[in-house]
Image: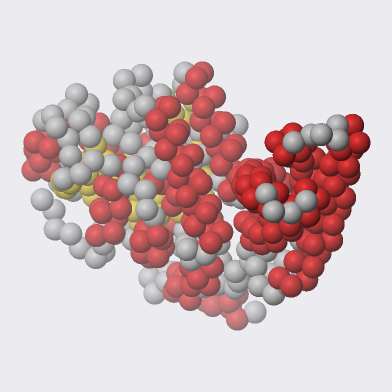
């Protein structure tokens, strides 16, 4: 087993679970490629997460027979759990993740890690969705992947193209800040890491890859997609509530001063819809409660008033990403929007009573619910273009982070003329 030193450039982690059929061939091929192609110091870490076949024994044998290979064994299953443990304990400058089946052509490894070793970028991912990528993949899997990534970009306000490609890298100093915040221990782990990274103002480098689907893959697409959707809701809620401190991380290592990114229009519609569904359900319960004690019009007014206050607060923070001062002003404007919505719903109630004076509470509720849905559309438009309209601001001035200033200085081993040129350039 090779000695672990603090001068290690790359730690290539290969999470495995019951891979006895392909492990030896894959690790041998990866080792051969690294030996002939890289000049940086590296090691391969086989991260076995609770395999039940002969994978653990094979991993130990490979570690004994191949220089620069070690094996780590976890008692619990989970790709994310394996990556988090190994990355958290590694002393390498750059931490890499590669799928065991080597679906991604390894020729993309050097361009993946180069911007991280230089300090230019913070994370790097392989993308199968770039026009120049060459992909061999079943149509069903490709459709699900593209749909998932599109939904991710539209709802989470991120710009990276491919969250699921098993070919990623991260700087160790950046990982030290982000890994403690990542909760998922399975397939959503790296997607969650990427969301937090972008929302923390970090630079994510993308590399087009050549990729061949593994027909023997045991990944359950439906179960994985379902877990990913739940993870997206959890992360979005955590960021909206301030439980996940992306603002603090942004201030520490972000590329420029923190500025909460505005959700996309599609993302706003989705979030507004979620708030609207909850508000409508709350409105129905409150209306039925008040209707037992006061006239229908007053019950409608009180139910709409109470839910509107909560609706405005939720949309301010969750839907439109507004923070800081202005809450009183926004609530006042929200009440004006409420007045418009009240006219719509009250008008529907007046119309119902003219058509059917004997209509009971449940019929009134059905009509008011339909009118409330119309009023919801009106509220969204007014909230977006008036109440929470974002003013155009000049782009922030980029400031280099101290953590990376060392990498911008002339190297002591550089050619004297090159070092002199760099020094003059930095003084100009």
Name the residue rendered at 74%, 72% in the picture. 328
From the viewer's perspective, tell me whether residue 273 is left or right of residue 195: right
Residue at 47%, 18% in the rendered image:
138
Instruction: Please provide percent x and percent y for residue 334.
Output: 78, 61
Is residue 94 among what the camera can see? yes
Q: Give the image location of residue 416, x and y in percent.
A: 46, 74
Q: Quadrant of the C terminus?
A: bottom right
Q: In this view of the protein, can residue 121 be seen by the observer? A: no
Figure quadrant of residue 217? top left
- Is 257 placed above or below 35 here? below
Whether residue 89 sits left or right of residue 108 in the image: it is left
Where's residue 154, x and y in %?
63, 43
Q: Nearer the viewer, residue 370 or 252?
A: 370
Image coords of residue 76 (percent x, y): 20, 44
Q: Nearer the viewer, residue 273 or 135?
A: 273
User: Which quadrant would residue 269 be assigned to in this image?
Assistant: top right
User: Where 414 falls versus 262 (above or below)?
Assistant: below
Residue drawn 24% across the image and 65% down it: 6
Q: Give the image's coloring scheme.
A: secondary structure
x 17%, y 28%: residue = 20
Left or right of residue 328: residue 123: left
């Amino acid at each position: 087993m090779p000695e672990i030193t603090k001068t290690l450039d790359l730690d290539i982690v290969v999470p495995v679970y019951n891979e006895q059929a392909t492990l030896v061939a894959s690790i041998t091929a990866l080792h051969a490629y690294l030996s002939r192609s890289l000049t940086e110091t590296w090691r391969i870490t086989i991260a076995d997460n609770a395999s039940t076949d002969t994978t653990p024994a094979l991993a130990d044998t490979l570690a004994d027979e191949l220089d620069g290979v070690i094996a780590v064994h976890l008692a619990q299953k989970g790709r994310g759990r394996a990556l988090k443990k190994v990355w958290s304990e590694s002393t390498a400058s750059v931490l890499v993740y590669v799928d065991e089946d080597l679906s991604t052509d390894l020729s993309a490894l050097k361009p993946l890690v180069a911007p991280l070793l230089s300090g230019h970028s913070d994370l790097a991912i392989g993308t199968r969705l770039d026009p120049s990528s060459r992909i061999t993949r079943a149509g069903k899997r490709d459709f699900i992947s593209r749909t998932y990534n599109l939904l991710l970009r539209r709802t989470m306000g991120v710009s990276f193209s491919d969250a699921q490609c098993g070919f990623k890298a991260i700087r160790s100093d950046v990982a030290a800040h982000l890994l403690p915040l990542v909760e998922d221990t399975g397939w959503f782990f790296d997607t969650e890491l990427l969301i937090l990274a972008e929302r923390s103002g970090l630079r994510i480098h993308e590399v087009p890859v050549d990729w061949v689907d593994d027909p023997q893959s045991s990944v359950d697409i439906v179960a994985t997609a379902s877990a990913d959707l739940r993870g997206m809701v959890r992360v979005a809620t955590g960021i909206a509530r301030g439980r996940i401190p992306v603002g603090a991380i942004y201030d520490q290592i972000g590329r420029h001063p923190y500025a909460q990114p505005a959700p996309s229009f599609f993302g706003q519609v989705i979030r507004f819809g979620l708030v609207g569904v909850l508000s409508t359900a709350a409105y129905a319960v409150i209306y039925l409660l008040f209707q037992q004690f006061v006239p229908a019009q007053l019950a409608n007014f009180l139910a709409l008033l109470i839910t509107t206050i909560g609706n405005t607060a939720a949309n301010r923070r969750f839907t439109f990403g507004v923070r800081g001062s202005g809450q009183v002003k926004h609530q006042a404007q929200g009440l004006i929007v409420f007045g418009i919505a009240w006219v719509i719903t009250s008008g529907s109630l007046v119309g119902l009573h003219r058509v059917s004076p004997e209509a009971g509470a449940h019929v009134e509720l059905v009509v008011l619910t339909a009118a409330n849905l119309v009023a919801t559309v009106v509220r969204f438009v007014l909230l977006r273009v008036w109440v929470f309209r974002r003013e155009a601001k000049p782009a922030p001035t980029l400031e280099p982070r101290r953590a990376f200033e060392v990498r911008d200085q002339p190297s002591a081993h550089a050619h004297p003329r090159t070092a002199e040129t760099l020094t003059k350039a930095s003084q100009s």
